[in-house]
Amino acid sequence: MKVTILGCGAAGGVPMISRGWGNCDPNNPKNRRLRTSLLLQNENLTLLFDTGPDLREQLLSAQVRSLDAILYTHEHADHTHGIDDLREVNRAMQKGIPVYANATTLACLKERFGYAFQPINVEKEPFFHPWLEPNLIKPGEAFYVKSLKIMPFMQDHEWTTSLGFRIKNFAYSTDVVHLYESALSVLEGIDTWVVGCLSDRDHPSHASIERVLEWVDIIKPRRTILTHMAPRLDYDSLRNSLPEGIEPGYDGMEIAVE
């Protein structure tokens, strides 16, 4: 399988409109970060994790015209508000796209974007809006997309919860500040982990570098890649200071996983 980091920036991206580049060197292209999203592909399947505001640019960069499913981590705007860009994917596929999310996220998506869940008769109607097919998932209950088994697990995001996902020996955990014991159990034995790390400072709803290092010491993945990073975190500075086996991600990064 191949994982592509479509975006590894926090809610404001890097540079931010308000704060600019922060500690990030603007001359390093790996510091320019779109909002966090991720793609997982094998020979017959393409999964998208979240639909942030930069989705159009991300899908064009990854040359994606077809999706087998979309997995939502949670309902926040920086992970959902690019949903209208899916219309072009529907148009290319000429059919709806299954989406998988927990009850809270599905309810929020239907409230904000109810039109996106209305079926389209492709023989009679143009694609004036996205066409999404909702599927409810629950933490701790595995589900399948085609033959690929996916295990969602609940994460603490302070004012809400988010979903992490384990797929074979790969796991994805963004927008998390505390990991429940149930999540640690699911993460046991993983090889590669993409995990959210907002800053070098404590934050009420996102993990810091120190928190991620504590988790890595418990879970012991072979490789850990940081995502959802704010402008305080410069790529080269992180690369040179993090322990072996832990590294910052960057937009367009491709990772071979098993």
Image (cartoon, rainbow, N blue to C red):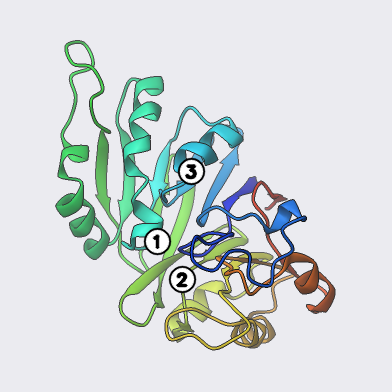
Quarter-wise, where is residue 241 in the image?
A: bottom right
- Label 3 secondary element: strand
Q: What is the x, y in percent for residue 75? A: 31, 61
How far apart are the alpha carbons under marks 1 and 3? 13 Å
Side (left or right) of 4 relative to 127: right
In the drawing, what numbered circle is on residue 73?
Answer: 1
Residue lying at 68% horizontally and 60% vertically, measured from the top left: 249
User: Where's the N terminus, which quadrant?
Assistant: top right
Please name the amino acid that badge 3 sits on: Leu
Q: Are marks 3 and 2 in contact (CB under 8 Å)?
A: no
Towards the viewer: 222 or 88? 88
Please name the amino acid that badge 2 sits on: Asp
In the drawing, what numbered circle is on residue 194?
Answer: none
Q: State which tag comes first along the sequence, 1 or 3.
A: 3
Quarter-wise, where is residue 193 in the image?
A: bottom right
Residue lying at 15% horizontally and 34% vertically, measured from the top left: 118
In the drawing, what numbered circle is on residue 175?
Answer: 2
Which residue in the rendered view is the most extreme toward the top? 123
Q: State which tag comes first along the sequence, 2 or 1.
A: 1
- Location of mark 3 (residue): 47
Please name the amino acid that badge 1 sits on: Thr
Q: State which tag comes first along the sequence, 3 or 2.
A: 3
Side (left or right) of 51 relative to 103: right
